Amino acid sequence: MRLTKILFLLTIATLTFGQSKQNKELLKQVDNFISDNLKNFAPGCQVLITKKGQIIYEKGFGNANLELNVTVKPEMVFRIGSITKQFTAAAILQLVDKGQISLTDSIQKFIKGFHFKGKTITIENLLTHTSGIKGYEQLDAKVPNAIRVDFPIKTIIDSLDKLTLEFEPNTKYNYSNSNYFLLGYIIEQVSGKTYQQYLKEYIFQPAGLNSTYYENQTQIIPNRTSGYSYSDGNYWNADFISMSLVYSAGALLSNVSDLYKLHQALYNGQIIRKETLLKAITRYKLADGQQIDYGYGFFIRNENGTNSIGHGGAIDGFRATAIYYPDQDIYISCLLNSDKDNEAKFLQSIANIILGIKTELNVQELKLNDDILNKYVGTYKNDNYNVSIKIYKANSRIYGDLSNGTGSYLMFMALTETNFLLPDITRIKTVANFVLENGKVSKLILTQERPLEFIKIE
């Protein structure tokens, strides 16, 4: 398939007058990084950077539609995937502020007939991914091409009710789209409005969001960007996916400007009370007192000594990230129209430039053939922590899923035949080394601050 050459044309630049010489140099470095590296991540992107409440950078790069050779503009809208969860969390917290629901309410109060053997699952458990409810991706629909089918919301909820819990509520953390799917349904039950209507009236309009939509693939939506998948060295139009399957966990479209407006509205107290936001951006504590890196719709992390608050989004054809660095009062959002699964590295490289952190921009990935990659496929277990990692091959690479739910579809970037970098883990450098004995893989060593050994069990 012949691809239209990506044009690195920046369309609109919003630069605050009076920028310091240092800031101008950093923004020039951002320009150069995106121009030099975008082709490795997506056909096109939008990037917005603010500092101390002022937009210092807002640009579109590359291609919004490869078939029509349309250049990305900042007003164009992209799928934002799981950043939708911030909107859903804000809506739930509004209802809490109004006294219509409580964080400690059992979800069975609003979802009649939702059983789970009498376990109490609260609104707060859904917000923090501590409910133990499995991801709806694990449902067996027994329907051909189920991803294309518009299922009634209640049908999916009834199917979730039939799954067993992964753990006792409030004892562990496991990121699960089902949690925010259920929160969308609760918003409808409490407000008497559809999820879409509620967001439009109580989130979009008060925050001044003019380019944020609940996706409808037959509706004409102004400035909608095309999304792409990548395989066999080519971009392809992303496959169709029914929005009924992602709903309040990931069905929104937006742009970098509207995402920043939401950030401002939340922090200014326009959407929810400031004390409510403070709880949302505080690490949640499990029943045993252990803190997790998640609040209510926000990841709260410390990456190499730098505090950050934000969320990423991954959905067919698109990747998205929006991060706030509170100590520096810097906000960065980035939207890409490809599902290559390396957007975290892209945004982190931009953030490192702005934050003045040395970054490894010149890491070269070694392409390995299928015979080598196939040797690493399998399951590896660490008995000390009772955790395993499943390694599998896709898109001419290997990926890993951790059994405790703290990482899934983690890309392994080959540096040598046996050594790999995990670029999706951005808060601390993570490398993997496969150990071979007599030509066969015997174990995997994951190293962050110290090595952790996983024995191959199958």
Image: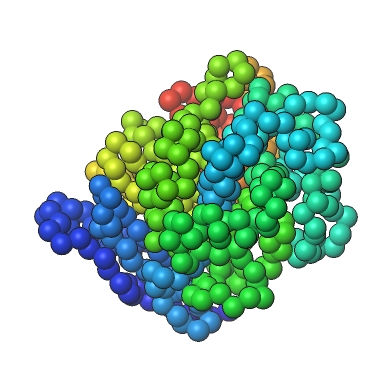
Position of the C terminus, as image quadrant, is top right
Along the line of sight, the residue nearer the viewer: 133 or 106: 106
In this view, which residue lies farthest toward the right?
A: 142
| Residue at x 39%, y 61% (from the top left corner) | 257
In this view, which residue lies farthest toward the front?
A: 99
| Residue at x 40%, y 56% (from the top left corner) | 261
Position of the N terminus, as image quadrant, is bottom right
- 201 relative position to 275: left or right: right
**Quarter location, residue 444:** top right
Q: Is residue 184 above or below residue 305?
A: below
In this view, which residue lies farthest toward the bottom?
A: 68
Whether residue 231 is visible here, answered yes or no, is: no
**Quarter location, residue 168:** top right
Q: Is residue 168 above or below residue 81?
A: above
**Quarter location, residue 355:** top left
Along the line of sight, the residue nearer the viewer: 194 or 55: 194
Along the line of sight, the residue nearer the viewer: 19 or 389: 19
Question: Residue 174 location in percent, x, y?
Answer: 64, 34
Number of labels in the image equals 0
- 69 relative position to 34: left or right: right
Question: Residue 189 location in percent, x, y?
Answer: 72, 48
Question: Residue 133 location in percent, x, y?
Answer: 73, 36
Whether residue 383 is visible here, answered yes or no, is: yes
| Residue at x 61%, y 72% (from the top left corner) | 237
| Residue at x 56%, y 68% (from the top left corner) | 227
Along the line of sight, the residue nearer the viewer: 4 or 325: 325
